Image (spheres, grey):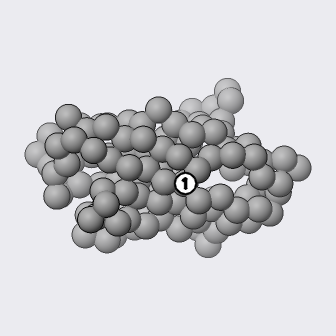
Amino acid sequence: QVQLVESGGGLVQTGGSLRLSCAASGRISSINVMGWYRQAPGKQRELVATMTSGGVTNYVNSVKGRFTISRDNAKNTVYLQMNNLTPEDAGVYYCNMAAFPTWSQNWGLGTQVTVSS
């Protein structure tokens, strides 16, 4: 069993920055992928960024060059640095983990990101 708790969301103006954190606890496999998803009102949840336990990263095209995902494996924590935010980035951001051997999905409850124009 894995529990994920996000923090760091808030209200920023267009062009501002936020840093999200996600702390994992419980039975954490050393072979895993952690990432961030987001969901805006009326839209489907979309993948934003992922990072494997080996350090390989992936980003959705719309955030490349603006967002950076990182991990501190000793603290079982993943971060998302978000720069140059726009209203299109607004929504609830969810932390996710999938791990060996079942690769079942684990989700946090989300943290709200609001971007004013």
Under tag 1, what secondary structure? strand
Can you identify the residue that label 1 sits on? 20
Above or below residue 79? Residue 25 is above
> Which of the 4 image quadrants contains residue 95?
top left
Q: x, y percentage for residue 93?
A: 55, 43
- The residue depicted at 57 percent of the width and 33 percent of the height is 44
Q: Amino acid at mark 1?
A: Leu
Given residues 40 and 4, the one toward you in this image is 4
Q: Nearer the viewer, residue 39 or 10?
A: 10
Q: Position of residue 23 (x, y in %)?
A: 38, 49
Residue at 84% x, 47% y is 116
Question: Does residue 114 appear to the left or right of 23 in the view shown?
Answer: right
Residue 10, horizontal then vertical, whole percent: 69, 46
* Circle count: 1
Q: Is residue 60 something one can see in this rendering? A: no
Out of 115 and 45, give the one closest to the viewer: 115
Indicate the quadrant containing the N terminus: top left, top right, bottom left or bottom right. Answer: top left
Residue in the picture at 37% in, 57% down = 77
Tag 1: Cα neighbours inside 10 Å, few (<14), some, or many (≥20)?
Answer: many
Q: Quadrant of residue 96?
A: top left
Residue furthest right in the image: 117
Residue at (25%, 38%) from the top-left corner? 2
